[in-house]
Image (tube, grey):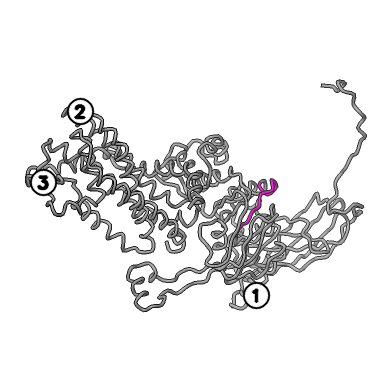
Amino acid sequence: MREDWKRLIAARDLLVVWTFREFKARYAGSALGVAWAFLYPLSLLLVFLLVFTWLLNVPTGGVPAILFLYTGLVPWLFTSGAIQNAALAVVANVDLVKSVAFPREILPLATVLVGFVYFAISGVLLALLLAFYSVPIGLPLLLLPGLLVIQSLLTLAICLLLAGSVVPYRDVRFLVPVGLQLWMYLSPVFYPIDLVPEWARGLYRLNPMAALLDAYRQVLLFNRWPDWLPLIVATSISFFALLLAYAYFKRAEWGFADRG
Amino acid sequence: MTVVRAEGVSKRYPLGATASSLKGTIAGWLSRRSAEEFLWALRDVSFSVDSGETVGLVGHNGAGKSTMLRLLARISRPTTGRVQTRGRMAALIALGAGFHPDLTGRENIFLNGTMLGLTRQEIRRRFDEIVAFSELERFLDTPVRSYSSGMSLRLSFSVAAILSCEILLVDEVLSVGDEHFAEKCLARMRKMRADGTTIILASHDLWTVSSFCSRAILFRQGRIQADGAAERVVEQYQGELEGSQGAAGETGSAELCLSSVEVREAGSLRIRIEFASSHVIDEAAFVVLIRRHDGLVCCTADNRAQMEGRAGRIQGEGAIQVALDGLHLVGGQYTLEAQVVDRVSGRVRGRSGRYLFMLPGESSPGGGITLVEAVWSPVLPVAPGSRSP
């Protein structure tokens, strides 16, 4: 694993350039271009508002529905978007994999980085919204970078696992959207954690995404420190998942050029 | 020093789709044996390459040349055996790796360059050199989508051309593109060879292999069939090709006859070649080779450079003549042979018998094969400071 790590460090420029390529290529030819980075989460926000707030009257924990939904939606879109793209990251570039030796983890890594760029773009809008509603800010905001890191590790772990397993098991590709749906409903994206029945809450919070989304809201909307225990669990899960996923990916990658 | 070593290398590929699905895997578990079938692309291949050697890998499609290169390049891993390389390595398996049609030429240079292992700083520093080599200055900020295939080829080779590496692996790259481009690539590779780069190239272009490489390895059905001096191995392979053609009932070859060879003074030859071809050869090039008595090829000349833009189609009977001048070979016995080569495949489609001739002149007392004009003059000791500006 140390050798792999060295090779990855040596190829960091490729990671930067490849990420740029993925970013630019995504909107090439579309009329609105990069504006979609704003428009996509905004239009989803409208859908969520329409369905969950106006039609179903889902409570929003005492904060404006726009803020509540957007703080759930933006981090969720980062993870789910990166995962969707990562599942195809290796398969879509199979010609490249067959003709050039480069650290293959760059492909899923780049999808996470591209996702992170969008995350940052949506984050600017979120900051504006928070300022507009004059949400109080304080010390807990210092935790935000930490939350971003944990979420990125978790996302990367899943991306590596999927990018690596889709090559030998093409069926996995079709399970990804289903899995993401399920995960979204099991995470407090558009409802507060209080809605989960008391008896299930312990189990519910083992879901790292639940802990993360709750922590984002505590920090951003309520100026409160989050529940530490679920967050520590989420951190450990993310960290170990990443180690395992990386080891799996590096073992699987030798088959990429042969099976493609 | 050995810089590339393959030891008992075998490589198999899974055949069929059974391996690539959950169903296949589960079926494999249930039946308790592997449902997969394999194709052995390489079997127990061993060789080593010394620093500075130029090695051509030849053989039919599917003989294992490309697989071998991929293993050396660490794109793929051998099923059994070991592959070791020492030193910075660059592999040109496919030109334009990672090119994206929506990105501009400039952006794709960085993409392709970092793919090949360069850093952005290295690319930036030698950017002008890359662009000059590609002759695409005006199109740098145009998306590669609107390039012709020749243009993107040029762009991608230009990036590869600045690679400085100790080992270069090349797969069939030179067989694409126009003559001018192929010549440019070859010139660059000659320079790398002169700089001591170890070059391993897989090619169907036997002409390139025998003229560029010092050594060739012939692959056949995943095994090494011959390994030795490029000229000899290529000849063996050509013999096989012709043999198999005959066996398949093909007649595509031309009969060649050196109808007159006139040796003039001062190393000048006039050669007339008559040919009779039972089939049409669309892209024919003529080659003449002069060998020393021991078989060493002293010089070759072909008419490819003069055929730029003209189809070298031959059909039926005809004759061609060539004047060789400035032949500075030491005196002695030589043989002359003419060949007609398919420019596309590099296959020899016909060869003449060997014509034995004598070149007048002395042999050089210290050995060697060419004569040079040497003018020696004494150098007087120069007192410091008295040197004229």
Q: Is residue B198 magenta?
A: yes
> Is the residue A33 above or below the residue B34 in the image?
above
Q: Earlier in the sequence, mark 3 or mark 2?
A: 3
B358 or B377, nearer to the observer? B377
- Please say if the residues under marks 3 and 1 sit with CB atoms less than 8 Å apart: no
> Is the residue B125 above or below the residue B41 in the image?
above
Which range is magenta? B192-202
Please rate how many residues cluster around mark 2, counting C-alpha atoms within 10 Å: few if below 14, some from 14 to 19, many from 20.
few
Q: Which residue is mark 3?
A: A51
* Badge nearest the viewer, 2 or 1: 2
Examine the image and state in which quarter residue A164 appears. Answer: bottom left
Q: Is residue A258 left or right of residue B254?
A: left
Q: Position of residue B117 (x, y in %)?
A: 53, 46
Q: Residue furthest front?
A: A229
* Badge nearest the viewer, 3 or 2: 2
Per the rendering, the mark at residue A131 is 2
Q: Is residue B179 magenta?
A: no
Q: Is residue B247 left or right of residue A99?
A: right
Residue drawn at (16%, 54%) of the image: A200
* Badge nearest the viewer, 3 or 1: 3
Q: Is residue B254 left or right of residue A225?
A: right
Examine the image and state in which quarter residue A139 appears. Answer: top left
Classify the position of the N terminus of chain B by image quarter: bottom right
Please rate how many residues cluster around mark 3, counting C-alpha atoms within 10 Å: few if below 14, some from 14 to 19, many from 20.
few
> Is the residue B205 above or below the residue B240 in the image?
above
Under mark 1, the amino acid is Gly
